[in-house]
Image (cartoon, helix red, strand yellow):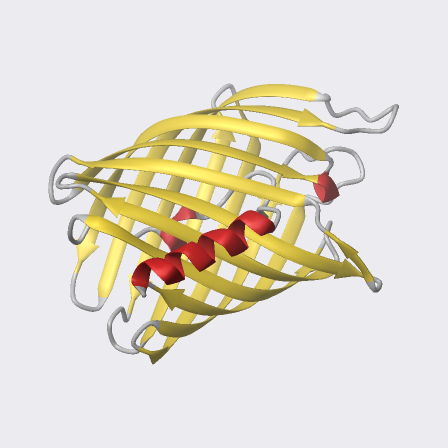
Amino acid sequence: MKYRILMIALLIASSLPFSAARAQINTERFRRDARQKGLEGNADIDLSIMTGNTDFRLIGLSSRLNYSWSRAYTFLVLNGGIGWNAGQRFMDQNTAHLRHVLILSPRLQNEWFVQFDSNRKRNLKERELIGVGLRTKLLTTSAVKLRLGAAYMYERERYELAEGNSHPRSLATHRLSSYLTLETGKGGGVSLLNVTYFQPALTDWGDSRLLSENAAAVDLAANLALKVSITLRYDSRPPDGVKKLDTVSKSSLSVNF
């Protein structure tokens, strides 16, 4: 039964375009620290309401597959969705993120990751990045978890822009990717998660991106939860005609397997 559910989730994910923000993806909300060796997964079915550069309704599936080794774990995040704008159906965003985490000590982890994405609404034709970094546990209690991470990443982007747009059509950037994660109430039926990313260019901190996600989850059953989240994404230097700030509000049913 477990693997039948896994296959269904994979088939649904592969049939949809992967969807995410142009500059960042919040991998922290998909992360599961290694518990025991083996495969596990998660699928969130959500309804999104977006404002800013994107004004539409989106029904989506966020899926995660995690394999735990003895001293490491690897996870793959795929996001998909179908959207409607003024009654017209469209699908125009894609993302896939793969990350390998090596457990160095009870408090310190080494991370390696790659990502591929695109977003037609923000004129991003394609983006690839690779990165490496460290993640540490600042605080761990029965009620509160606080995590801090920092990584170096190299990204390449190509844009589809109109003539006269001052933004470059092709960019290659070295960035710092730092994040702080606060999780409270885990295991009590209701949990809260706040994740904030800051990603400045190493050669020009005026070129920066910020992602902040605030989410609440209520357990409905042993493997079923209701999630509500609000996300803010900021890009200090978007292409001409693209707004700097986007917001996303989501309501999701989360199924664990």
- Residue 157 at what x, y percent from top left? 62, 25
Location of residue 224 with respect to 54 vertically, above or below: below
Residues 49 and 34: in front is: 34
Residue 224 is drawn in which quadrant?
Answer: bottom left
Residue 169 is drawn in which quadrant?
Answer: top right
Residue 29 is drawn in which quadrant?
Answer: bottom left
- Residue 105 at what x, y percent from top left? 11, 39
Report whether residue 199 is seen.
Answer: yes
Q: Name the residue furthest right.
A: 163
Q: Quadrant of the C terminus?
A: bottom left
Location of residue 7 with respect to 116 vertically, above or below: below
Q: Name the residue furthest bottom.
A: 220
Please name the residue shown 30% across and 44% down the image: 148
Image side of residue 147 versus residue 218, left or right: left
Residues 206 and 75: in front is: 75
Please name the residue shown 63% across and 20% down the image: 171
Q: Quadrant of the N terminus?
A: bottom left
Please name the residue shown 40% across and 71% down the image: 217
Image side of residue 59 versus residue 98, left or right: right
Report whether residue 33 is seen.
Answer: no
- Residue 229 at what x, y percent from top left? 50, 65
- Residue 255 at what x, y percent from top left? 40, 67
Count of numbered badges drawn on the protein = 0
Location of residue 3 with respect to 107 vertically, above or below: below
